Amino acid sequence: MNKNTVSALSQKEAEIVARLSYEEKNIVTAKELDSYLPVDFKYRRKLVYSLKKKRILIPIKGGVYIFVPLESVPTGRRVSEFLIPPIFFPKNNYYVGYSTMFNYYNFTDQQFQAVYVLNTTLSRERTIAGLSFKFTKIPSDRLYGLEKIDIKGGEVIVSSKERTLVDLIYYNKPVGGIEAAIEIFGRFVKEKKCDIKKLIEYTVQFPKIKTRKRIGLILEKAGVSDSILKPLEKSVKNTSLISFSNSRKGTKDERWGVIVNPQR
């Protein structure tokens, strides 16, 4: 414990810190701080300013803070990245996805630094408590195939494994491009590490036709039966020809309307 920090605390600050530590708080709001103080207490702003200066409270957004226990003050506290997004999107119009969930589902051993938060209202980048967040605005029709997970007593909305596989083919840059994404996707399908019917259901619902076509061809090559692939095949019927790997050289796959390069 940092003795210098302890000695620098006022009596009221020490009481607040003790209370937050006892309740094992990770995130604390201004309203909660008010509930810990006497009704006639006039110096909350000054108290909060002092605790921020001493790195015991780290601002997330207006009136919401990360609480850093005294023993963690010297090095700073690493809070789970999953605890931050719900604070910005109280209407649940978001999900944690892309490379963050690639790690979560063990698609790759590569560790990604940015936390992707797909949502319908906000597009910006922020660093919070040393963590890099990419808030990425998407259309509301892409908020599906999601589930809630419990992180330290709080619920966080994330993409399900099957939905994350769809996103992997759509946004494959973090893993090194489409070929690397195909390898990961195909492995999970062949090793039956996902629900194929649910995967196809989520693919059919995905608004980007190129992603649907790519996944259709990948699943066919992975040995998925024609009867299971039928809804996906129907969803791309009579649509424009696309290139599987962004090259116009290759042969045309009539079923999926895709130009396939020679190595594929």
Image (cartoon, rainbow, N blue to C red):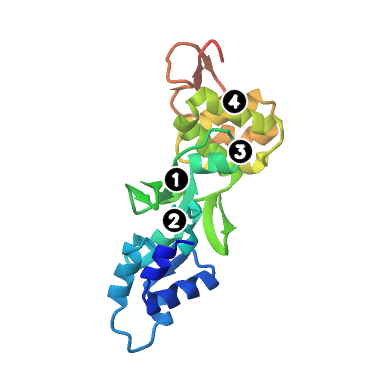
- Judge by depth and name the residue closer to the eye, 113 or 118: 113
Question: Residue at position x 38%, y 87% from top?
Answer: 38
Circles 2, 3 touching at the beta carbon (< 8 Å): no
User: Callout 2: 10 Å neighbours few (<14), some, many (20+)?
Assistant: many
Residue 141 screen position, x and y as percent:
44, 49
User: Is 147 on the left or on the right of 69, as rendered?
Assistant: right
- The mark lying in front, picked from 3 and 4, is 3
Q: Is residue 202 visible?
A: no
Secondary structure beneath dot 1 equals strand
- CB within 8 Å, label 1 to label 2: yes
Q: Quadrant of residue 184?
A: top right
Percent position (x, y) of residue 23? 54, 72
Q: Distance between the residues labelled 3 and 4?
A: 13 Å
Q: Earlier in the sequence, mark 4 or mark 2?
A: 2
Q: Residue 238 carries which label?
A: none
Q: Name the residue under label 3.
A: 106
Q: Are marks 3 and 1 in contact (CB under 8 Å)?
A: no
Disc number lying in front (1 or 4): 1
- How much space separates mark 1 and mark 4, taking CA atoms? 23 Å
- The residue indicated by pointer 4 is 183
> Tag 3, which secondary structure?
loop
Q: Is residue 4 left or right of residue 162?
A: left
Please tell me which residue lies in front, 197 or 40: 40
- Nearest the viewer among 71 and 258 is 71
- Front-most of 98 and 130? 130
Amino acid identity at mark 3: Asn
Q: Identity of the amino acid at label 4?
A: Glu
Q: Residue 115 carries which label?
A: 1
Dots 1, 4 in contact, CB < 8 A: no
Say what amino acid the circle numbered 1 marks: Val
The Cα atoms of the two marked residues, 2 and 3, are separated by 21 Å
Residue assigned mark 2: 85
